[in-house]
Amino acid sequence: MRMRQLPVLLAGLTFSLSAFAASADQWTLPVAVKKLDNGLTVIVTEDHSSPTVGVSVVYHVGMRLEPKNRTGFAHLFEHLMFQGTPNAKKGVFDTTITAGGGRNNGSTRPDYTNYIETAPVSALEPILWLEADRMKTLDFNPATLKNQQDVVKEEIRVNVKNQPYGGFYWIDIGQHAFQKWENNHDGYGSFEDLENASLDDVRAFHRDYYGPNNAVIAIAGDITPA
């Protein structure tokens, strides 16, 4: 490359990057943040490009905060959040969302647990009601607990124990990288700890961590903040 061409190329690159940045700025979406009297943080983003909405409810509790001798409990509790409440029996949450073509899921991480829904915007009010309902209480019963203990154990068999030549780095690295219990145990937990989890444990976990003052809800889509 001839050196006298370099300034021209650099100038062209600078212009291209500036044009890209200006174009990217045009897609910046407005964000409104409000903290309610009950402690719940609400984040709303308008995007009227399609008549859909996405909802994410994040609780500030994850694998690090699960009780000792209850490894895997945060993940187990995530499963229990989909098993119904006294007001909305098991299946109501899923069918309310999927009936209109939406979908929902949950995930457990070291520092938080996240529940997400995407659906037509017409489903927003039912989604918010259902999220508030399971934030308030769950259908605590022995059969549901036993069922989800078995489901989580099967996940461990499939994703961990039946993977002899590999694994998930986020499961394996903690025991080698950290000394404190909060960081060196994996989020799936042991069968023994899962089997020993009781309804009292479930109620206490919900009471301590699943309140509005420990949660953030983000809503994005074809909506307008009040």
Image (tube, rainbow, N blue to C red):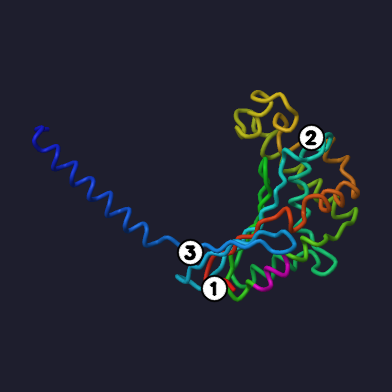
Where residue 215 sits in the image (x, y, percent)?
A: 70, 55
Badge 3 amino acid: Pro
Kindly identify which residue carries mark 2.
Answer: 190
Badge 2 amino acid: Ser
Kindly identify which residue carries mark 3.
Answer: 30
Q: Give whichever of 44, 56 is nearer the camera.
A: 44
- The residue most toward the bottom is 122
Quarter occupied by residue 219 = bottom right
Instruction: Give the CA distance from mark 2 to mark 3.
Output: 44 Å
As drawn, the label of residue 224 is 1
How would you rate the neighbour count of disc 3 (Cα within 10 Å): few for under 14, some for 14-19, many for 20 or more?
few
Give the total of numbered labels: 3
Magenta residues, start to end: 125-131
> Main structural element of the magenta stretch: helix, strand or loop?
helix
Secondary structure state at the residue bearing disc 1: loop
Q: In which quarter of the image is the C terminus?
A: bottom right
